[in-house]
Image (tube, rainbow, N blue to C red):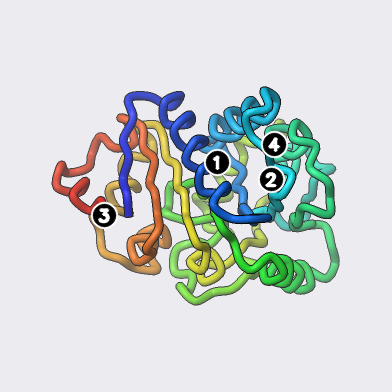
């Protein structure tokens, strides 16, 4: 595990995008798992700029979405796919055959789970997984107490997740369930990149890195993964003990 602290979000985003680029270039035709949310926006912006300026070739990259709200898909403003379309897929002109993303409106949601796992297997696993950090410690929509061995699944949303999720919508939504890559699925990724910024994340960052490793805080399980990089701005890292940075290996 490597814990990286930056003075501000822009510096964090630039370094994370450079590192993701480097990691993805290590493998031919790599698969990247992408999260929606606020924390990765700067990373995506930097990747798009590098592609636009012919400094990055992503023609061999494939993409798999991390999660989606049940009942929503890319046609719904505020959905995970909607935001990633705007921030990443549309600017990069990603072809649908290079992309798997959950459709939360489908009747057969178990097939959506099965298809995601198949897409990952067909690409020989996730090479880089980009993650944000939920205020309750969730990864994707793997809520507290989710099994560390879980595969892609449908989940009941924690009240914190449902409440926080309202910020992505112009009007109040009923958010009860989600569909997400499982913790076991994510932990099989060759590399994991987690980004957290802002003072609101300081408490859960401390719990993730200094608390007990437990399914109660899914993000704490990342401490068991060999190739994890944690990117924090000064505010998100503000409650950490100096000794915590000695976890860097």
What's the residue at 69%, 49% (across, down)?
61
Mark 3 and mark 4 in contact? Answer it, CB < 8 Å: no
Mark 1 and mark 4 in contact? Answer it, CB < 8 Å: no
Mark 3 to mark 4: distance in Å? Answer: 31 Å
Along the polypeptide, which appears first: circle 3 or circle 1? 1
**Is residue 12 in view?**
yes
Q: Position of residue 81 (x, y in %)?
A: 73, 45
Looking at this view, is 109 or 56 the one in front? 56
The residue beneath circle 1 is: 21
Q: Of helix, strand and loop, which one carries label 1?
A: helix
What's the residue at 64%, 70% (across, down)?
153
The residue beneath circle 4 is: 88
Mark 2 to mark 3: distance in Å? Answer: 33 Å
Q: Of helix, strand and loop, which one carries label 3?
A: loop
**Is residue 67 in view?**
no
Q: Position of residue 46 (x, y in %)?
A: 58, 28
Along the polypeptide, which appears first: circle 1 or circle 4? 1
Q: Residues within 10 Å of mark 2 (few under 14, many from 20)?
A: many
- Front: mark 3 or 4: 3
- Front: mark 1 or 4: 1
Q: Of helix, strand and loop, which one carries label 4?
A: helix
The residue beneath circle 2 is: 80
What's the residue at 72%, 34% (across, down)?
171
Mark 3 to mark 1: distance in Å? Answer: 21 Å
Using residue 235 as the reference point, say whether residue 145 is left or right of it.
Answer: right
Looking at this view, is 171 or 26 the one in front? 26
Mark 2 and mark 3 in contact? Answer it, CB < 8 Å: no
Q: Of helix, strand and loop, which one carries label 2?
A: helix
Vertical arrangement, residue 87 with respect to residue 157, above or below: above
């Amino acid at each position: 595990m490597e814990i990286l602290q930056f003075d501000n979000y822009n510096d964090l985003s630039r370094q994370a995008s450079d590192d993701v680029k480097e990691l993805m270039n290590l493998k031919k035709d790599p698969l990247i798992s992408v999260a929606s949310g606020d924390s990765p926006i700067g990373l995506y912006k930097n990747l798009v700029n590098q592609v636009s300026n012919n400094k990055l070739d992503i023609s061999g990259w494939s993409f798999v979405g991390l999660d989606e709200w049940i009942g929503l898909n890319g046609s719904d403003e505020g959905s995970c796919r909607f935001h990633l379309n705007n921030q990443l897929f549309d600017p990069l002109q990603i072809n649908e055959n290079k992309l798997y993303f959950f459709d939360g409106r489908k009747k057969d949601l178990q097939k959506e789970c099965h298809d995601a796992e198949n897409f990952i297997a067909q690409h020989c696993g996730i090479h880089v997984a980009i993650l944000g950090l939920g205020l309750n410690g969730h990864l994707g929509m793997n809520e507290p107490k989710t099994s560390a061995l879980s595969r892609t699944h449908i989940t009941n949303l924690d009240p914190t997740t449902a409440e926080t999720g309202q910020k992505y919508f112009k009007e109040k939504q009923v958010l009860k369930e989600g569909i997400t890559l499982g913790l076991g699925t994510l932990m099989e990724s060759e590399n994991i990149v987690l980004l957290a910024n802002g003072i609101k994340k300081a408490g859960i960052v401390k719990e993730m890195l200094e608390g007990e490793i437990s399914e109660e805080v899914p993000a704490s399980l990342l401490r068991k993964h060999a190739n994890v990089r944690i990117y924090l701005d000064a505010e998100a890292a503000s409650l950490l003990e100096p000794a915590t940075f000695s976890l860097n290996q």
